[in-house]
Image (tube, rainbow, N blue to C red):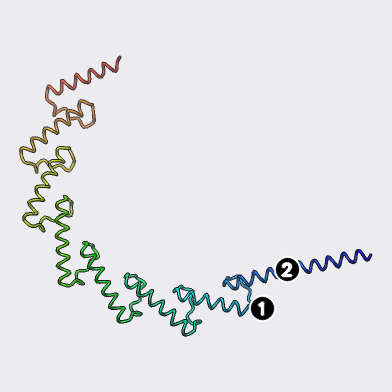
Amino acid sequence: MRVKILFILLAVVSARGQSGEKQKREQAINLDNCLKGLSSCDISALSTANLAEVAAASKKRNLEHCMEGRPMCDPTRLTKPEAAAAGAGFNKRNLERCRESSASCDPLRLSSTDLAAVETASKKRNLTRCLGGSATCNPLLLTKEEAAQVNAAASQRNRQNCLDGLQNCNPTMLAKEDAARVRTLFMKRMFDNCMNGLYSCDPLQLPSVEATEVAAASRRRNMDRCMKGMQGCDPSLLTAPEVAAITNAHRLRRAKGAR
């Protein structure tokens, strides 16, 4: 009987010990959740010392949010020195956004010195866009000297486009000597295109000597296509000897295939 009672007492003590350990683990997990500001935190389960610790962690976390400009920041919880530091950080980030022409820039938060610097940076970016021929260039922001630079850059860009045979060439903007060189290069490209049978060939642009040479090259290409039985062969362009040669070549190929 005594042994049975002893076993019961030991079981009760063991159960109480396990229950106590479980409670300690739960309290530790809850404290960790509260320190991290998680929604699963149960403030009612904290001790007075734990509450002070959690409050300090919350204030520190809020200060970090404010210093980094996060939406979770509550500026009303900051001390005056903390508010001043957070405000300085915000102004610095705002200045950078304004320098970059970000939509989130707040120009009203800029000092007169910063506003002047932002306007200078904006004009500099606009000049760069204008010099590059960007559609976002605002010529009204250019000074007289900058406008002259932009016009010179546009002329040089157009000259190079014309020399390269690009579609955005404006020949009316070319100097007389450049127009002559561009015309020479244009005729050379046209002749090469026609000699290679490219779709961009316009034989009507060619002088008679080159037109004759292009016509001969076209007949040779047609002869080659017909000889090989390729699509695009035009028999109407063949001479009688060429038709005979092609017929004989086809006959020989059929004979070899029949063996």
Q: Residue furthest top?
A: 259
Q: Position of residue 48 (x, y in %)?
A: 65, 80
Say which of 104 and 65 sits in front: 65
* Residue at position x 47%, y 81% in the image: 82
Residue 89, above or below 168: below
Judging from the image, what secondary structure is the residue with disc 2 in? helix
The residues bearing labels 1 and 2 have C-alpha atoms spaced at a distance of: 17 Å
Classify residue 38 by image quadrant.
bottom right
* Residue at position x 18%, y 41% in the image: 199
The quadrant the N terminus occupies is bottom right
Judging from the image, what secondary structure is the residue with disc 1 in? loop
**Residue hosting label 2:** 21
Q: Residue furthest bottom?
A: 80
The type of residue carrying mark 2 is Glu
Q: Is residue 9 left or right of residue 162?
A: right
Q: Is residue 206 left or right of residue 5?
A: left
**Residue hosting label 1:** 47
Q: Are marks 1 and 2 in contact (CB under 8 Å)?
A: no
Classify residue 225 by image quadrant.
top left
Crowd around label 2: few <14 · some 14–19 · many ≥20 (10 Å): few
The type of residue carrying mark 1 is Ser
Q: Earlier in the sequence, mark 1 or mark 2?
A: 2
